[in-house]
Image: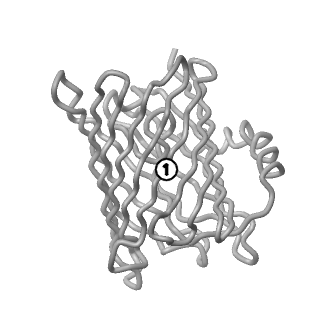
């Protein structure tokens, strides 16, 4: 039922997708693994927070990523569904377009997020994630992987800080284990507008050493009580391709009545 819901909502976002692709123009692909992405505002761009959506509620997000040097587009449909009050089912379906001869799906990721500690006056919220990926098109895939991560979130006044640590093992022994650290800040700046910043440090499946140190910044606008638009920019200080990314994220929530 969950996957059927995702397919049905592809039509809901298709017009917006076509419009944005026309406006942005040109594309190509950077071979990296996206994995689970937070449905905004459940994170700061790609850094996840420890909160869940609540039982039988669902959040859906369309993501459009435009990278520079090399150029590519990556479209993604991300969803988070509340199986229980403190347990969410997550899914990410990334699609690469514009790469000559290699367009198609990347690895599809499915996971569970379990919130085990709620935020106290002095302590943070704590959740963990377990996930696995199904192989996509061969040229765009690492053949699937399995892993998980730890998520810490602490709110202080208008600030919300998120710390993520992920570890993934590829099914294909030709690739290396991946370790990724994400740190993000979310600032409630003015009414319905949040400023976002994060840093990502990663030793990817393609290297024995840290090969990505990327800073990202952006802002999120609350259009309605259930709908959000996020714009962001990322720059890789390690000069790992792609060096520059632009993000457009459109998310909406459906709550059990």
Q: Is residue 244 left or right of residue 97?
A: left
Residue projecting furthest to the top = 257
Is residue 24 found left or right of 210 in the rendered image? right
The crowd level at tag 1 (other Cα within 10 Å; few <14, some 14-19, many 20+) is many
Where is mark 1, residue-wise? 216
Res. 90 image quadrant:
top left
Q: Is residue 106 left or right of residue 170?
A: right
49 or 189, which lies in front? 189
Tell me what residue is drawn at x 51 percent, y 35 percent. Answer: 40
Image check: 100 left or right of 112? right
Please report the residue visible at 33 percent of the width from the left and 80 percent of the height from the top. Answer: 208
User: In terms of depth relative to the viewer, which is nearer, 174 or 132?
Assistant: 174
- Residue 128 lies, with reference to residue 74, above or below; the image says above
Residue 78 position in % (x across, y down): 55, 45
Indicate whether 68 appears above or below 119. Answer: below
Q: Which residue occupies 32% across, 53% down? A: 130
Q: Quadrant of the N terminus?
A: top right
Q: Residue at x 52, y 51 (%)?
A: 92
Element type at mark 1 = strand
- Residue 134 at x, y = what percent? 49, 64
The residue lying toward the viewer, choosing from 71 and 168, is: 71
**Residue furthest toward the front?**
237
**Residue 180, percent from left and from top:** 34, 61
- What percent of the width, then of the height, locates residue 183? 35, 48
Quadrant position of residue 94: bottom right
Number of marks in picture: 1
């Amino acid at each position: 039922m969950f996957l059927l819901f995702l397919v049905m909502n592809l039509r809901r976002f298709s017009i917006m997708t076509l419009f944005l692709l026309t406006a942005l123009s040109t594309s190509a692909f950077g071979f990296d693994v996206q994995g689970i992405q937070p449905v905004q505002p459940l994170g700061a761009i790609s850094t996840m927070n420890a909160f869940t959506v609540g039982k039988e509620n669902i959040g859906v997000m369309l993501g459009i990523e435009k990278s520079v040097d090399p150029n590519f587009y990556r479209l993604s449909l991300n969803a988070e569904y509340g199986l229980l009050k403190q347990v969410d089912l997550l899914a990410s379906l990334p699609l690469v377009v514009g790469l000559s001869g290699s367009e198609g799906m990347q690895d599809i990721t499915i996971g569970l997020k379990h919130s085990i500690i709620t935020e106290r006056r002095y302590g943070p919220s704590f959740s963990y994630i377990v996930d696995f990926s199904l192989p996509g098109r061969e040229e765009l895939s690492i053949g699937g992987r399995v892993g998980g991560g730890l998520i810490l979130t602490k709110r202080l006044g208008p600030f919300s800080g998120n710390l993520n640590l992920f570890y993934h093992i590829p099914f294909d022994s030709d690739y290396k284990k991946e370790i990724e650290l994400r740190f993000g800040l979310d600032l409630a700046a003015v009414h319905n507008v949040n400023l976002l910043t994060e840093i990502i440090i990663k030793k990817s499946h393609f290297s024995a050493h840290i090969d990505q140190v990327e800073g990202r910044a952006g802002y999120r606008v609350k259009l309605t009580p259930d709908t959000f638009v996020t714009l962001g920019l990322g720059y890789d200080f390690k000069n790992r391709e792609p060096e520059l990314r632009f993000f457009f994220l459109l998310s909406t929530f459906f709550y059990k009545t």
